[in-house]
Image: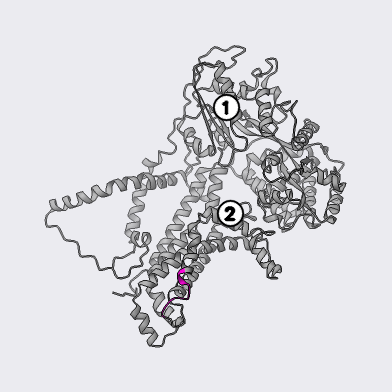
């Protein structure tokens, strides 16, 4: 898993690894692993101290009523998890996160794939990208260079109902009737946030997919063209199947981002998390519960729930489409 | 091609390792010592040194360095040093008080004086519950710095002691006194011949007049509905008086169903229904709404007395903002229209596990002297929590209006404790007010949902309950 998740693969033709040489005698084996262990140990220790240990503490704290400042905490068993089930705001946050999970990755990947295809193969002849492809690639990547806080603040300005960019443009082109209070209408606010997530994410996946399409041997496209395949067919029958791994990795990344969304919601929305809980996300509930209400135990329970939610999603995403029926090139 | 699948077994193995390592690692967070360290308190007590400060004991002061800066604290530290020669003072002016100090409280080595303010501050109720805070009664009963015949308690403005009392223990001494109200530009009103209304019908008539002049009568900080919740709660509290405040704060059944609460909600909703609120206000942040107000796009905005300093850089010359009291709904109100919402803030704490508790207490005695407060008021244009601290100063129109409003209110101060005691109820109130002002729910629905939130808190055994007497 780690390889696929951590280094999105664009190179499709890496040679199969040579089979490991079996050591003949046990002593040799130990010597061989000694080096490996020596090399891994420092990293492993860091990982345990800074990653595993905080996780373990959070798991433990989720079973207590720790208030964040006391030297001690009382063990309360699974009471915190029982409360989660009846916490209407937290349930609303799960609903919102699931809605984000359902729509945001699909939209981002869809737009990213479309733009990548246009940039690589969008020309009239079907053999190259649209005119100015390089320019578009750079421009679409811009949002990736901004920190999420800046993105949120800028879009907060753009969504301003009175002098914001969006309503300003709508009014300027005579569509003033469509001007809305984007972040203050319960039915729109979450989609307004989602649009920002898509806008800031598309550039990265555009570059990722674009590089992957670049890695597909030209002969295959050439053969398809000669066979008379049009753009759609080429996309569905060649590009998409060969980009399957990349799409899958993108889906995992974006799914995790959809289950988070804390920073944008915290900075942009009414309340934040509003109006009236309509943009509440799990991370925001967790943050408020811990740092405003002083209930670190309960907040840890939320964190644990979020952890398992993300884990289950990642397993399903990696397993559901991974597999034996993968299109092989080499 | 290497497989990128995770085997089920690998996941289970990882989970098992996690589970086994749990108890050992989990000890880290909450392993702080519970017992208080012995304090440097060996000095002799006297009238001039009521806490028996040991002259050579070091003092550590950690303050939030925000809009008010920390110069006034440093000035008081210099006074402390000249009094206790040999005392080394470790001063830290920081922003993230909670993040910095939480681990130190947990580990049992907090500083001697803390100004717990700003975003990400520590939860004082939780600190108090965990016995992390020194009870400051001895400070209240100590002779004040300026006049040994007057106790510190008697120099404070009304409500400061109440504000600092958690669960019966006075643990928090607030430096700044904040009053809430409705703000307007005095010259703008004078130019148009508008008079500040004292009753709600007068307010509605005024709004009609303002609207005709082409200016939106009201705007509010829509992203943070607590701003517009304030005038609502003030009108409700005037109608029901202290009894209502007490029953609301004590989570009594049907406390929110009092007729004056509903009447206040109807009044606030009426503003929107009659089109007296600037369109789009519901989506504006405080800076955006206040900016529009300073540009003259709206005439009235609810806020607290920090507004002048917050708007300093964007207020046009001659704007001369002043605060008006919220008008009264009915002549049969239990409290008059002089009653305003006021409370103290900028919390000073002395941790009970501090190394030098007596030094911390005596430092606060110096910091809350009239001279130090006077310097503070002069430097930052804000009202401190000691009475008479602004005497003899030339004040801005804004601060003058606040001072006069506080004086006119006398002891008729409106303050609600449930907002700090029960934050989930506060959120329900504020979220609901946002919906109410946007006319998405009716006043009756607002009352229902707030009452339900209050009932939920009352029924929740995991929430610590407080009592307002």
The answer to whether dots 1 and 2 both sit on one chain is no
Mark 2: give few (<14), some (14-19) or many (20+) Cα within 10 Å.
some
**Quadrant that contains the C terminus of chain A:** bottom left
The residues tagged by marks 1 and 2 sit, at their Cα atoms, a distance apart of: 35 Å
Circle 2 SS class: helix
Q: Which residue is mark 2?
A: A153
Q: Is residue A189 above or below residue B462?
A: below
Magenta stretch bounds: A127-134
Image coords of residue A13 (percent x, y): 29, 70
Residue displayed at 54% across by 19% down: B81
- Considering every residue shown, the one lying at the far left of the view is A25
Q: Residue at x 32, y 59 (%)?
A: B9
Inspect the magenta stretch and tell me whether residue B100 lies in it.
Answer: no
Q: How has the structure been colored for display?
A: one colour
Q: Few, some or many C-alpha atoms within 10 Å of disc 1 (few <14, some 14-19, many ≥20)?
A: some
Q: Which chain letter matches label 2?
A: A
Residue B315: image x %, image y %? 71, 45
Residue A69 at what x, y percent from top left?
A: 51, 36
Left or right position of A113 against A35: right
Q: Residue at x 81, y 44 (%)?
A: B187
- Whether residue A207 is visible here, answered yes or no, is yes
Residue A72 is marked as: none
Residue under mark 1: which chain is it in?
Answer: B
Asked whether residue A247 is in view, the answer is: no
Q: Residue B299 or A72: which is nearer the viewer? A: B299
Q: Quadrant of residue B254?
A: top right
Residue B393 image position (x, y, % from top left)? 74, 28
Name the residue at 81% across, 46% down. Answer: B188
The chief SS type of the magenta part is: loop
In this orientation, which residue lies closer to the viewer: B459 or B409?
Answer: B409
Residue B74 got which mark?
Answer: 1
């Amino acid at each position: 898993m780690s390889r696929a998740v951590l280094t999105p693969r664009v190179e499709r033709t890496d040679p199969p690894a040579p089979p490991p040489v079996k050591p003949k005698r046990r002593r040799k084996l130990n010597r061989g692993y000694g080096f490996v262990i020596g090399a891994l140990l420092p990293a492993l220790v860091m990982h345990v101290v800074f990653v595993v240990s905080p996780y373990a503490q959070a798991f433990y704290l989720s079973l207590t009523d720790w208030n964040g400042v006391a030297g001690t905490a009382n063990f309360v068993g699974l009471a915190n998890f029982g409360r989660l089930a009846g916490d209407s705001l937290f349930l609303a946050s799960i609903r919102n996160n699931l809605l984000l999970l359902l729509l945001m990755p699909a939209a981002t990947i869809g737009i990213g794939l479309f733009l990548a295809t246009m940039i690589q193969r969008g020309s009239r002849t079907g053999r190259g990208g649209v005119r100015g492809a390089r320019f578009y690639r750079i421009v679409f990547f811009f949002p990736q260079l901004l920190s999420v806080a800046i993105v949120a603040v800028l879009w907060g300005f753009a969504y301003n109902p009175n002098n914001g960019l969006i309503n300003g443009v709508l009014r300027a082109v005579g569509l003033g009737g469509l001007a809305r209070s984007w972040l203050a209408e319960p039915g729109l606010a979450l989609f307004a946030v989602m649009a920002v997530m898509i806008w800031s994410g598309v550039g990265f996946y555009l570059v990722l997919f674009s590089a992957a399409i670049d890695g597909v041997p030209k002969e295959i496209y050439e053969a398809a063209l000669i066979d008379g395949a049009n753009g759609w067919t080429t996309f569905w029958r060649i590009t998409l199947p060969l980009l399957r791994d990349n799409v899958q990795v993108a889906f995992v990344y974006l799914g995790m981002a959809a289950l988070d969304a804390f920073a944008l919601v915290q900075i942009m929305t009414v309340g934040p998390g509003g109006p009236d809980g309509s943009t509440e996300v799990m991370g925001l509930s967790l943050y408020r519960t811990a740092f405003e209400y002083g209930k670190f135990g309960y907040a840890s329970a939320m964190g644990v729930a979020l952890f398992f939610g993300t884990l289950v999603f990642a397993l399903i995403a990696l397993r559901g489409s991974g597999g034996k029926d993968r299109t092989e090139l080499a | 091609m290497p497989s990128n699948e995770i085997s089920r077994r690998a996941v289970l193995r990882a989970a098992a390792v996690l589970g086994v390592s749990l108890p050992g690692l989990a000890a880290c967070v909450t392993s702080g010592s519970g017992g208080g360290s012995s304090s440097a308190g060996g000095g002799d007590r006297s009238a001039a040194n009521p806490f028996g400060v040991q002259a050579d004991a070091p003092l550590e002061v950690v303050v939030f360095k925000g809009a008010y800066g920390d110069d006034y604290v440093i000035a008081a530290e210099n006074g402390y040093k000249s009094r206790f020669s040999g005392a080394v003072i470790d001063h830290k002016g920081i922003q993230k008080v909670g993040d910095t100090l939480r681990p130190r409280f947990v580990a049992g080595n907090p500083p001697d004086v803390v100004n717990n303010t700003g975003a990400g501050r520590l939860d004082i109720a939780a600190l108090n519950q965990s016995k992390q805070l020194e009870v400051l009664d001895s400070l209240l009963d100590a002779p004040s710095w300026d006049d040994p015949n007057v106790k510190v308690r008697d120099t404070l403005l009304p409500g400061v002691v109440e504000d600092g009392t958690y669960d019966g223990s006075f643990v928090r001494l607030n430096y700044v006194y904040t009053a809430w109200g409705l703000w307007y530009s005095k010259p703008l009103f004078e130019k148009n011949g508008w008079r500040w209304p004292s009753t709600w019908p007068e307010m509605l008539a005024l709004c009609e007049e303002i609207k005709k002049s082409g200016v939106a009568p009201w705007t509010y900080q829509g992203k943070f509905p607590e701003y517009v919740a304030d005038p609502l709660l003030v009108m409700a509290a005037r109608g029901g008086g202290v009894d209502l405040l007490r029953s609301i704060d004590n989570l009594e059944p049907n406390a929110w169903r009092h007729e004056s609460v509903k009447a206040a909600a109807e009044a606030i909703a009426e503003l929107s229904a009659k089109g007296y609120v600037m369109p789009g206000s519901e989506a504006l942040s405080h800076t955006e709404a206040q900016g529009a107000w300073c540009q003259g796009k709206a005439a009235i905005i609810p806020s607290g007395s920090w507004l002048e300093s917050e708007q300093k850089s964007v207020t046009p010359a001659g704007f001369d903002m002043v605060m008006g009291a919220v008008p009264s709904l009915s002549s049969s109100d239990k409290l008059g229209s002089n009653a305003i919402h006021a409370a103290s803030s900028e919390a000073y704490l002395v941790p009970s596990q501090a190394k030098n508790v007596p030094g911390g207490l005596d430092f606060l005695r110096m910091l809350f002297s009239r001279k130090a407060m006077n310097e503070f008021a002069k430097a930052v244009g804000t009202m401190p929590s000691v009475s008479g601290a602004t005497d003899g100063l030339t004040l801005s129109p804004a601060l003058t209006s606040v001072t006069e409003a506080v004086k006119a209110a006398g002891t008729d101060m409106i303050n609600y404790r449930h907002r700090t005691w029960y934050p989930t109820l506060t959120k329900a109130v504020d979220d609901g007010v946002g919906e109410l002002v946007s006319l998405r729910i009716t006043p009756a629905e607002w009352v229902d949902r707030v009452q339900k939130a209050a009932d939920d808190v009352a029924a929740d055994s995991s929430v610590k309950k407080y009592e307002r007497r």
